Amino acid sequence: MSAFTGSTRDTASVPSEDGDLLAALLDGMDAALCALDADGTVTHWNREAERILGWPAAEAVGRRGFDGWAARSADAEETLARLMGAMRTPGRQVHELALLRKDGGRVLVRSQSAGVRGADGRPAGVYCAFSEVHAQIDLERSIALSEALFDDAPWGVVLIDADL
């Protein structure tokens, strides 16, 4: 079974229980998630991606690249190349990307993308998680403030995300 079969809305090629579980996990994530196959075609699109950009999975899955819908034509080739570059490098790649919302507005997102290998070990595509930059900046600012305030404190705080 390929990591890139089906979508969050169409898991016919995945056994029903596995497909339902995968769809629930993807749609329940706090971060937007999309996946592209090795040709740059969108294979997965979760509810948070839909919330941020306004494009439902039914309109996103199956499109090649982002030209004319999720990215301006002038930016689309570079955006796709940056994300697909994760197939050639180990680990996660972090990028800030200007994307288009369905209503025509632009949104700056911070993405983390990672390549996915197929059963044969060859690059099969890319998974990309993203969120609006302002949300990331707020989190980083809070962490930096906490570190500054508690740097010399004789005690510590453990932050646990109950959703994980």
Image (cartoon, rainbow, N blue to C red):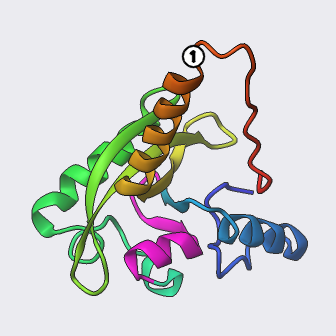
Pick the front one: 153 or 56: 153
Pick the front one: 9 or 3: 9
For image coordinates 64% across by 65% down, the residue present is 5
The answer to whether any part of residue 61 appears in the image is: no
Tell how many labels: 1
Q: Is residue 59 magenta?
A: no
Using residue 22 as the reference point, say whether residue 105 is left or right of it: left
For image coordinates 66% across by 54% down, the residue present is 3
For image coordinates 16% across by 59% down, the residue present is 75
Q: Residue furthest right?
A: 17
For image coordinates 30% across by 44% down, the residue present is 82
Pick the front one: 94 or 137: 137
Tell me the crowding category of disc 1: few under 14, some 14 to 19, or many 20 or more residues within 10 angstroms, Cα based. Answer: few
Q: Is residue 143 above or below residue 74?
A: above
The quarter of the picture where residue 116 lies is top right
The quarter of the picture where residue 109 lies is bottom left
Q: Is residue 89 above or below residue 100?
A: above
**From which residue to which does the magenta span run?**
37-55
